Structures are given as structure tokens and as C-alpha cells.
Image (tube, rainbow, N blue to C red):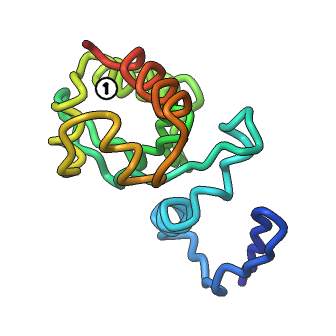
Amino acid sequence: MSYIVLKSRGELRIVPEVQYSNVHLERDLQSLISSNPEIIGSLVCDDSECDIRSLKREVRLPSGGRLDLLLLASTGKLFLVEFKRDMGYRDAIAQLLDYASDIQNMTFNELMRILEIDVETPEQLYEFLFGDAEEDTIQSFVETLLNSLTS
């Protein structure tokens, strides 16, 4: 049995107890991180004010690959998460690089279509995921996100 306690903005929250099995460990971790992306938020966000959201699990990519989890920070940075138990380090890195190349070659609209998110602009995506913000914050988000994708 495992317990995970999350501390966010001064509040403690206990993630429900889960029985992790050796057989389903990758899937269990994927589910846990997808439901609670703040678990790894401090690892991927430089800014303490950065929020992180799970966009989709099992993302089917144009190359035919399937990314375990795609996260997006309120800064506009995309994070690809792949869970591996038995694959060698080099193979896992090569797989992630292939997936990153797939995503980098997408337009914003192509990415939204694959993620099944019904927004037309990066500004709408920010509002959908993170709510209202100052114009400068949203503009920075848009620039960072679009720099990760094909224009």
C-alpha cells in the first residue's frame, strides 16, 4: 500500500490509498500522475506560481506511437511523460524524442484535434485550463506554446 500526500499552496491533501501491483504499475502511475499532475509539477515548473494540467493520456501520435501522458504548464510549456519499467534507458529516450518530434511538427489546431479539446486559439485553451489571467501572462503562455509547435 502507498500513501501520497500533496502539499499545494499551504494545503495538504491525501491521495486515496491505492494497491499498486507489479503487473499494472505503469498504468497505476499513469493514472495517479494524470489525476494529480502537481505531483511532478515542482520537477517541471521553474516558477512556484506555475500550475500544471493533464491534457490527455494515451495520446495517439501521427507516427503511430502512443504517448502515455501529455501535460501543459501555465507557462505554455508542454511536458511529455512516458512510463517505462522494462525498457532500456537509450530506447526510452529515443522513443520520447520521436514523440517530441511528432508534437513539434503539429500546428496548434492539429494538437487540439488529437487531444479532443474544443478550442480554437491558445488564448481559449489557457482560459479553459487555467481560468482568467493578466494579458501579459496569457501572451507569454501563447508565445511559449506556439514556439513548441509548427506555426
Question: Which quarter of the rendered picture does the C terminus lie within?
Answer: top left
Residue, far right: 10
Quadrant into which the N terminus falls: bottom right
User: Going by the image, does 37 lie left or right of 50?
Assistant: left
Locate residue 100, reporting x and y percent. 39, 24
Q: Residue furthest front?
A: 135
Residue 92 visible: no
Task: Tell me the residue that label 1 is attached to.
Answer: 103
The percent position of residue 3, horizontal first and vertical second, equals 75, 79
Determine whether 41 is above or below 47 in the image: below
Q: Which amino acid does label 1 sit on?
A: Ile
Q: Nearer the viewer, residue 92 or 144?
A: 144
Q: In front here: 85 or 37? A: 37
- x and y percent of residue 83 in the render? 51, 48
What residue is shown at x 22% (from left), y 40% (from top)?
112
Q: Who's the residue at 28% across and 23% down the image?
A: 102
- Residue at 35% across / 42% down in the picture? 67
Tell me the SS state at disc 1. Answer: helix
- Which residue is at 72% across, 41% downward? 43
Name the spot of residue 130 as percent of width and height, x first: 48, 52
**Residue 94 figure quarter:** top left
Q: In this view, does 18 lie above or below 47?
A: below
Q: In this view, does 109 lie to the left or right of 45?
A: left
Q: Residues within 10 Å of mark 1 (few under 14, many from 20)?
A: many
Q: Tell me if residue 120 can be seen.
A: yes
Up-down: is 44 above or below 93?
A: below
